[in-house]
Image: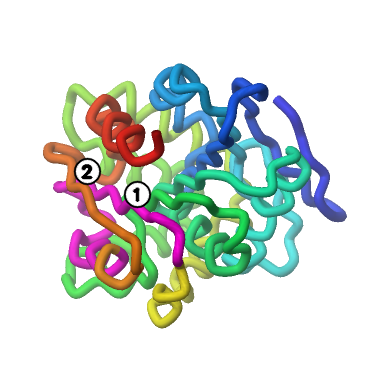
Amino acid sequence: MPFLPLAARLTIHYLDHHPSGRPTILLLHGLGATCESWELQLPALIGAGFRVIAPDARGFGKSTYPGKSHRVADMANDMADLLTAAGDAQAYVVGISMGGVHALQLALDHPKMVARLVLVNTFASLRPDKLDVWLYFAFRFLLVHTLGLPTQARAVAQRIFPRPDQEMLRQILIGQICQADPRGYRATMRALALFDVRRRLGEIQCPTLVITGADDSTVPTKTQGVLASQIVNARQVVIPAAGHAVIAEQPEAFNQALLEFLV
């Protein structure tokens, strides 16, 4: 489990699986989650011969939160520095939710580093057109600023994994969210609320796959459709019976779609 010091008070923790494999895949996790959230993708990706690098974003998991500037661009730059330090000038980049935002920013700011792009249940700008989605985000913002991270974790986990048979997945997600630095979590929520690269989507030239969980209750499918329609070399795959955590809910279908695009 390597750690990469990037600046004063900023160290990025990451997992480096099958370092002799090629090409490299960079896996970027969602808000509150950690690099461990990609566990169900590792056997398929390693079996296909890839090197898999999965970092904790700053302020999440075992990575530190420096407590200064905290923009999406900063978090994307962390990933560019990580790839450089790992000896990879270019990688396939896969991001879910918040990780998809970081992947988008990385592709815009460091286009030569992104050979292929996979955007999972994510957005170029989160401006929901449904009241219940707005209320959900307002509720999360209120919780994390008042009752704290553990309460936020339980609420988010219940929303993402609502079924009784998903209790184990709920507990895993709660444990991951509670590892986050509360300051970093709050700052990241604010950064994501301000994120808007809709006008820049046409700049992305690399082959792009948009993967959407058909039942995603966090990022509307219409919002995800903007990515597929505005990125030149993009196509979209919708996975049935999957919500926001499609990588855990439907790992076999997700892995198949991912490998069909990457291999």
Amino acid at the residue labelled 2? Gly
Q: Can residue 145 be seen from the camera position used here?
A: no
Quick one: SS at disc 2? loop
Residue 216 drawn at (x, y percent): 21, 50
Q: Quadrant of residue 112?
A: bottom right
Closest to the observer: 203 or 226? 203
**Dot 2, how many residues are within 10 Å of its Cα: few (below 14), some (14-19), or many (20+)?**
many
Establish if 135 lies above or below 55. below
Establish if 152 lies above or below 69. above
Q: Which residue is situated farthest in the left direction here?
A: 240
Name the image quarter holding the N terminus: top right
Q: Is residue 213 magenta?
A: yes
In this picture, which residue range is highlighted in magenta?
Answer: 205-227
Closest to the observer: 255 or 56? 255
Name the image quarter holding the C terminus: top left
Q: Is residue 82 magenta?
A: no
**Residue picked out by circle 2:** 243
Residue 189 drawn at (x, y percent): 49, 63
Quick one: SS at disc 1? strand
Residue at 18% x, 41% y is 239
